[in-house]
Amino acid sequence: MSRRILIVTLAVSLCTASVAHGQTGYVPGVTFQKDNPNYTPRNPFYFEGRVDWNLLKIDQPANAWEFEQRGMHKQDDLEDNAGAITDYRQAISTNNLDNGTCQLVTTAAQANSGAQLTPPPCMFTVRLRLAGLLVDSEPDQAIGLYNQVLAIDPLRLGVHASIAEVYVHMAETALNAGDIPDLFAHAIAEFKAEIALSPVTALQVQLTGDEANNAHVHWALADIYEKLSQPADEMKELDLYLKATKYHSDTYPWRIKLAQKKMEKAQAAEEAAKAIQENN
């Protein structure tokens, strides 16, 4: 039997079987799952990527995922951040650990069980989006949302750095100067937590010569230490920044030359501080 005849025969057989089971009104993604007792319900893991809102044909959001999608549409397409914040908050209100409308999936057994998860898993994208919109107006809420993301996915890269950036923003806009050192200390701790998620191992150095990673974080740490007038720590971070950019460059390559100049300035400040101590 030729391949073409085999394909046609198989197609006819499938159509005949569909009609025999009363599936003449087959709707992809709906009819088969509903009518086939051997097809288990899918895990309700939300696809959290953005879908074109117009293609969804949704008149009014009815669940957390749909409110998230409309919020993305408002934020990205309409530049309606206020409307996006409202939709994101509505999504989180129905996907929330506090009221039992979502759960943390912490084991492979949960994820691969094949059973319906009730309540559904907690969503992280809507929290990341909302946090980003609240940094200026409600920084404490933004930090809380980022921490919720870390509860959902403790190893997710970029979240600790985002929290650190909120603390930096709070320090730079603080009305009480006495709060600034503590805010910067929180930022430093979060930036270090970010680096700890992607450590440079001895084997990595041996095989590649790459001695540091995450140039962005080292640059940010150096900037904080410069503001705190701690030249020794600033030089250490600038050195790591330059080592990281040696293999990974930087989104803003002009900072590489600037880092070298900052190293010279910090070294001069460090030597001046030592000279003052010696004279005293």
Image: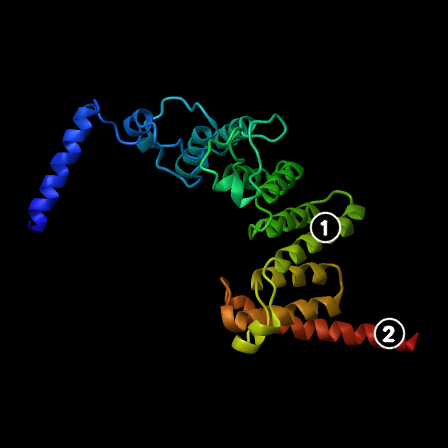
Front residue of 52/79: it is: 52
Give the Cα distance between marks 1 and 2: 30 Å
Choose between 17 and 224: the one closer to the eye. Answer: 17
Give the left or right position of residue 210, taking residue 228 as reference: left
- 59 lies left or right of 137: left
Instruction: Looking at this view, name the residue that lies furthest to the front.
Output: 1
Residue 198 location in percent, x, y? Answer: 58, 61
| Scheme by which the image is coloured | rainbow
Q: Visible in this render: residue 172?
A: yes
What mark, if any, has residue 186 been given in the picture? 1
Q: Residue furthest right?
A: 280
The residue sitting at 52% across, 45% down in the picture is 108
Residue at mark 2: 276
Identify the mark at residue 47; answer none if there is no mark: none
Percent position (x, y) of residue 48? 44, 39
Characterize the local packing of mark 2: few (<14), some (14-19) or many (20 or more) Cα atoms within 10 angstroms: few
Can you give x and y, in whole percent of width and height, for residue 36 in the image? Answer: 31, 28
Could you say where residue 222 lies in the image, as x and y percent from the top left?
66, 63
- Circles 1 and 2, Cβ within 8 Å, touching? The answer is no
Q: Is 25 left, or right, of 184 in this rendering?
A: left
User: Residue shown at 78%/43% (left/top)?
Assistant: 176
Inspect the image, locate mark 2, and give the three-letter code of the amino acid beneath it. Answer: Ile
Question: Callout 1, which amino acid?
Answer: His
x 82%, y 72%: residue: 273
* Circle 2: element type: helix
